[in-house]
Image (tube, grey):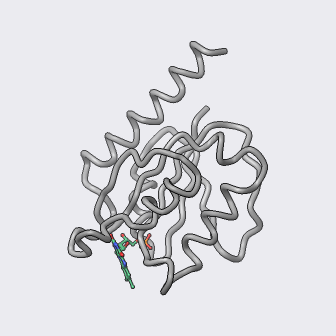
Amino acid sequence: MACIVYYSLTGQTRKFVNKVAGFDKYEISSDKEAIEMTEPFIMVIPSYESHVYGDVIETAEEFLECGDNAQLCKGLFGGGNRNFAQLFCVTVKELSVLFDIPVLHGFEFQGSPLDVATLTKELEEIDQYEKIEH
Ligand SMILES: Cc1cc2nc3c(=O)[nH]c(=O)nc-3n(C[C@H](O)[C@H](O)[C@H](O)COP(=O)(O)O)c2cc1C
């Protein structure tokens, strides 16, 4: 069953993913060892410029480099703030290039009901696809 892997520095992303019902969530942080996932997941990462707040992208990179995690990560959701203009959702854009994983969606702060529905739908689609494949 698909799950959500996320990072949250100030709690907005945590509030967003906790609004998604029916799927397991796993929070990564710089003080936890990366774990090897065994099921597909969507990664939800807030945006912080990597040259200033390197911990965020480094933690996400270490997680994706662990075991088969990069293959199991079916897509990225970026948290951010549109006031950052071209830097909106910059962290998932960088991860997308580094790991060849698509950016599925960008949202602001703790997300709107539409953002919650979008993440739910993407997770459901992963599970449906897995059922057909296996
Ligand atoms: C210091 C700082 C830098 C930020 N840089 C960006 C940015 O470059 N691009 C962006 O879209 N949002 C940026 N944001 C907005 C955060 O990504 C946004 O508030 C997000 O919801 C925070 O998630 P979190 O509370 O889970 O850490 C920044 C916020 C802060 C406080």
Please tell me in which quadrant of the rendered image residue 68 appears.
top right
- Image quadrant occupied by the N terminus: top right
- Image quadrant occupied by the C terminus: top right
Q: Nearer the viewer, residue 92 or 113?
A: 92
Work out which residue is located at the far bottom of the displayed protein and give it: 52
- Figure quarter occupied by ligand 1: bottom left
The residue lying at 48 percent from left, 63 percent from top is 94
Q: How many marks?
A: 0
Q: Left or right? Give the position of 65 relative to 129.
A: right
Please tell me in which quadrant of the rendered image residue 38 appears.
top right
The residue lying at 59 percent from left, 17 percent from top is 131
Q: Position of residue 87 (x, y in %)?
A: 32, 71
Please say if 33 is above or below 98.
below
Q: Position of residue 37 (x, y in %)?
A: 72, 46
Please tell me in which quadrant of the rendered image residue 10 appears.
bottom left
The residue lying at 54 percent from left, 47 percent from top is 100
Q: Position of residue 12 (x, y in %)?
A: 39, 69
Please say if 60 is above or below 71.
below
